[in-house]
Image (tube, rainbow, N blue to C red):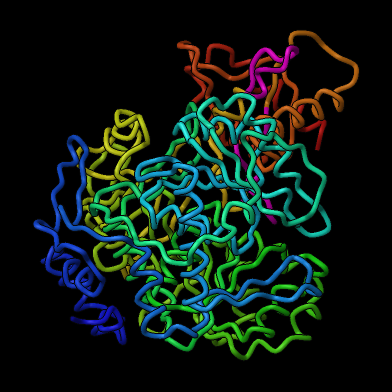
Amino acid sequence: MKNIEDYKIKNLDDFNNQREMAANEPELFWSGIASTFQWNKKWKNTLKYDWSIPNTEWFVEGKLNITENCLDRYAKSNPDKKAIIWEANDPNEDFKVYTYKELLDEVCKFSNGLKKIGVKKGDRICIYMPMIPELTIAVLACARIGAIHSVVFAGFSSVALAARINDSSCSVIITSDGGFRGDKITPLKKICDQALKNCPTIKNCIVYKRTSEKIDWFKNRDIWWDDLIYGLPDKCDPTIMNSEDTLFILYTSGSTGKPKGMVHTCGGYMVYTAYTFMNVFQYSQNDVYWCTADIGWITGHSYMVYGPLLVGATSVHFEGVPSYPDWGRFWQVCQKHKVNQFYTAPTAIRSLAKQPIDFVNKYNLSSLSVLGSVGEPINLEAWEWYYKNIGKGKLPIVDTWWQTETGGIMISSIPKVTKQKPTYATSPLPGVNAEIVDNNGNLIEESSAEGILLINFPWPSIARTIYGDHDRYKNVYFSAYKNKYFPGDGALRDENGMYRITGRVDDVVIVSGHNLGTAPIENSINEHPKVVESAVVGYPHEIKGNALMAFIILYDKIDDNESIKKEINDLISNSIGPIAKPEKVIIVSGLPKTRSGKIMRRILRKFANNDMENLGDTSTLLNPEIVNEIKNTLKLLN
């Protein structure tokens, strides 16, 4: 049996050969990679798909358990190898190391704990925890026994948490008494308690003691983590899963309505995340890799938990923030653990670039070999600062484009193999058939192109559906362009075939790397008794990449605009989370609308971008006079 490292791209010829094989014989290509993993039963068909439904299946009728491939085989072949190095929020707290054997033992113990309270294959388990090792252990324990994990970022409000629990009818929630984040403590158990008042399907709340905060306790529902696993064995046979069984549900913001629970399955996700992790970061077996993301996002799932463990990597997991106790913390951790690959978000890079360079220069970063960027397209100034000050003008930067829906990286350079170009994600990876179409859906065949990005063939880690709503999945991703996946992004392709992502073409705004649908934010604002209507758009922000601007109509004029703005932001924080608060709230008497009543957001985006003149065709507006009124309001505020 081949090893997955046999598929590591070593040079440009190797890259071109793999890309050609993946394009011409995709089933042969991906089945070869899949064969490097442990399967309990080999698949009958490598791929079955029909995107008119849409339906995608990889490694059909193959049977496996992903945790055997993440843990058991390395615990057997190299038990003392470091799997996770956990760095606490407080640098004075000792870091923890889990070898592959130790991580397997902890996962098995917690798996047995879940089974003790009746969790079985197919049950949905919500995880709402800080960035501590137990979060990873909980994720893997669910996967080991066939339960479906749904991790919710521990910055979401109780309302947002409850919505996600109820959408997938979770039976258990796993949380912590609190979480450390910089100099603050997030009261996670308190937020959970508030959410669970409206979550009738939850039977048990498992609580890990992290902060020792005082918490309320519900005797017949709550269980301490340590009490649950006390005396349980560290052996737990993995539940055998079909390749197309659900591994996890992860919620992402939609342009309309409630968040979308993207469903990822076991086999294809395993194969794709392992292959892309190894190649995009050019990981070697003695390296130390660090992704600074939170496991509550897809980046944490794919490139902190599953991808690294599937290739036997050593990775750093970090509880804290880049600014605590000072702005040198990232670089202190890189020096301390001799990090080789460093993967972070443009928002973090922009924040770090604003600080004195002494925070960087006092640390030895000579161990670094690859830098990465994720979450949104990186702007030129951030790229140049990263390259010059962290890469010392010589390290490759992988500017990765992908989504919660894609499961893994789709477009990226390969370090020291393919060329990089500042602000460009560069080349589609082997097996990713990208194309650009114009606004009418016509394929642009010229090498240089700008338009809408589409993917015209399945890759193994594509999300299979939206949980409980396949019609919505079809309408969002496959209805606009027949038999093609529409990611919602625009793209530019240069004469050398390099791709640059130009931003969303739907009503989703990427703020600090997080996709925020504007509709749920508007719905939250409209709940305020003084608000008639609202419209939210994005605009460029030097730190966050994009920020939100809300235009709001009130029933009556008020004397204190600042108080209403605070009330609106508090409302959004409570219903969605602080990440969704608008940076600017503009009170107006009306919104530009077409005669059919549709808000012309294009004009509002122009205003938000401080472009007051190039408004395009406004002849279809029902109320053209409102344009000048809003323009004058913004001029007064500026």
In magenta stretch: residue 546: yes
Q: Is residue 257 above or below residue 145?
A: above
Count of numbered circles in the view? 0
Image quadrant for the C terminus? top right
From the top left corner, tell me how far across and down residue 267 is, in percent.
27, 58
Which residue lies most toward the front here?
A: 231
Helix, strand or loop for the magenta stretch, by majority: strand
From the top left corner, tell me how far across and down residue 425 is, in percent.
43, 65
Which residue lies most toward the right here?
A: 559
Q: Residue at x 34, y 60 (%)?
A: 238
From the top left corner, tell me how far across and down residue 523 is, in percent.
60, 22
From the top left corner, tell me how far across and down residue 535 is, in percent.
61, 25
Q: Residue at x 67, y 17 (%)?
A: 527
The span picked out in magenta is 524-550
Image quadrant for the N terminus? bottom left
Q: Is residue 572 above or below residue 56?
A: above
> Front-most of 599 and 219?
219
Give the side of residue 188 with respect to residue 442, left or right. Answer: right
